[in-house]
Structures are given as structure tokens and as C-alpha cells.
Image (spheres, rainbow, N blue to C red):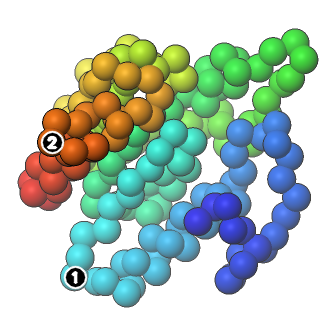
Amino acid sequence: MFDYRGFGESDDFTINKDMLYYCQFEQDLMAVMKFAKIKYPKNKTGIWAFSMGTIITTLVNETARPAFIIADGFVTNPLKLKEAWSTKDKLFLLPDDANTYEVKLAAIKEPMLIFSGKQDKVTTDAEIQKLKKTKPNIKVVSFDGAHMMGLQTLSKEYPGSQYIAEIDKFLAKK
């Protein structure tokens, strides 16, 4: 969805590759949530987010009010992410609302399923376990793998079978 900004009802804009995310991405997700809730009013609408998409999910949560969140590679703090990724040769940028991220994360009340790689150096399992202690409505599936490798790692019968089974169990309770 975010790769095709400038089509449909969204406005195109120049993207600085050093910017980790833009507030326009929040507008895009809000538009998708609004559309889904109008189109399917009897269904529960949730968000399945990956890595940087978890930032946008967190920022729109209060307004979008998804019924649930499924996340892989969940970002707990974009400021720490910026510090970790920036070097003396390359400085990553964040929009102004990055300073409110932790407040918005704390405000999430919706049930969450988070896949967390024990060797993830980007969105560490330690940070996810710390987050879980503050939010009893989070189910964490830790796996022996790196960033966003849950689908590949959680396999028994076929690729991703355990991953999909965890999502099915989570959604069955919703």
C-alpha cells in the first residue's frame, strides 16, 4: 500500500531515503481502515504490520481503533532505532511526532500478537518481552531467528505452518 503513494486519492511527494517514515503513511493507513470498516461493517478489522509498519500502526491506533494487531518485527521505540541505524556517515531522520511514540504505544489497549526473533538485532526480543510486561493483552511468539524471519522459521509441516497456526489461534479468540 505505501509503495504506491500518489495513486488513488493520495498525494505523491518526494521521499527522502534517510527519513524512517512520514506522517503521510499514517494518513494512508487511516484511509484503509476507514474504507474497510465502511465496506465490511459487520467484520472486525485488525491490522497486520511488519517492522516499520508497526510504527505507523502504533501512531494511528487511537484514531483507527483496530479490533486487534498482529505484528512481526515490532518497533518499540523509533528514537532508539534511529540511534542504532545512524552512523557518522549516514544520519536517519524522524518526523516530529516520533517524540510522542512511547505515549501512543502505552495507549494501545487492543489485543496484540507479536512475532519476535530471538536473534533480531533491529527489534529485539528483549524489548518485546519488556513491552509484554506492561501490556497483559499481548501474546508474544518468540522464535529462534532474525528480524521478520518468523514465517520462514516457524515451520513443521510446510513453510510458515506454525506461524499461521499462531495467527489462527489468536484470531479464534477475537
Res 91 quadrant in image:
top right
- The residue shown at (37%, 78%) is 37
Instruction: Give, as a three-letter code, the residue at label 1.
Output: Lys
Residue 47 vertical position relative to residue 104 in the rendered view, above or below: below
N-term mark: 1 or 2 = 1
Res 145 quadrant in image:
top left
- The residue shown at (38%, 54%) is 48
Question: Label 1's element?
Answer: loop
> Which residue is label 1 attached to?
42
Circle on res. 157: 2
Query: Residue 49: image x %, image y %?
Result: 44, 50
The image quadrant where one finds the N terminus is bottom right
Instruction: Give, as a three-letter code, the residue at label 2.
Output: Glu
Q: Is residue 115 left or right of residue 51?
A: left
Residue farthest toward the bottom in the current orientation of the protein: 39
Answer yes or no: is residue 100 visible.
yes
- The residue shown at (72%, 51%) is 22
Q: Is residue 21 left or right of residue 89?
A: left
Residue farthest toward the front in the current orientation of the protein: 158
Query: Residue 47: image x %, image y %?
Result: 38, 58
Question: Label 2's element?
Answer: loop
